[in-house]
Amino acid sequence: MDPYRLGDMEQKFADLIWEKAPVGSGELAKLCEKVFAWKRTTTYTMLKRLCDRKLFANNSGVVEVLMTREEFQAAQGEQFINDTFGGSLPRFLTAFSRRKKLGDREIAELKKLIDAYEEESHG
């Protein structure tokens, strides 16, 4: 099982938790009944899956975030680049920019990121 790949409903459920956390598990079950028409058992099954993937923790009936949405998205991107481009960010950017031309703003943002990385690693 790929820890950074979520099914459609898992993603919607994770988004709900990120929006509401920390949240009581009972309150979460009621919310899922209203939003997704889920039974309590479905909520707890889905919660266990996402807790097993270390996105969330259910501590004494309170669901807490272990990995923020941004951290999760970064991990998804890193996994994609590793799986598809052998971990090579330059290979990914080359492939990406062949299909979609980068605008001046995007190029400036990438240059800024590279400059900040160089300062961080050399400073």
Image: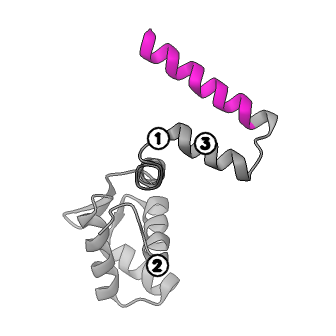
Q: Position of residue 85 (x, y in %)?
A: 47, 49
Q: As displayed, is residue 90 above or below residue 36?
A: above
SS for callout 2: helix
Majority SS type along the magenta span: helix
Q: How is the image coloured?
A: one colour
In the image, residue 122 lies in the stretch drawn in magenta = yes
- The residue where tag 3 is placed is 93
Judging depth in this view, the residue of 11 and 96 nearest the camera is: 96
Image disc number at residue 12 = none
Image quarter hosting the N terminus: bottom left
| Three-letter residue code for mark 3 | Leu
SS for callout 1: loop
At horizontal 34% and vertical 81% (from top left) the residue drawn is: 43
In the image, residue 29 lies in the stretch drawn in magenta = no
- The residue where tag 1 is placed is 88
Judging depth in this view, the residue of 56 and 59 nearest the camera is: 56
Lower position in the chain sequence, tag 1 or tag 3: 1
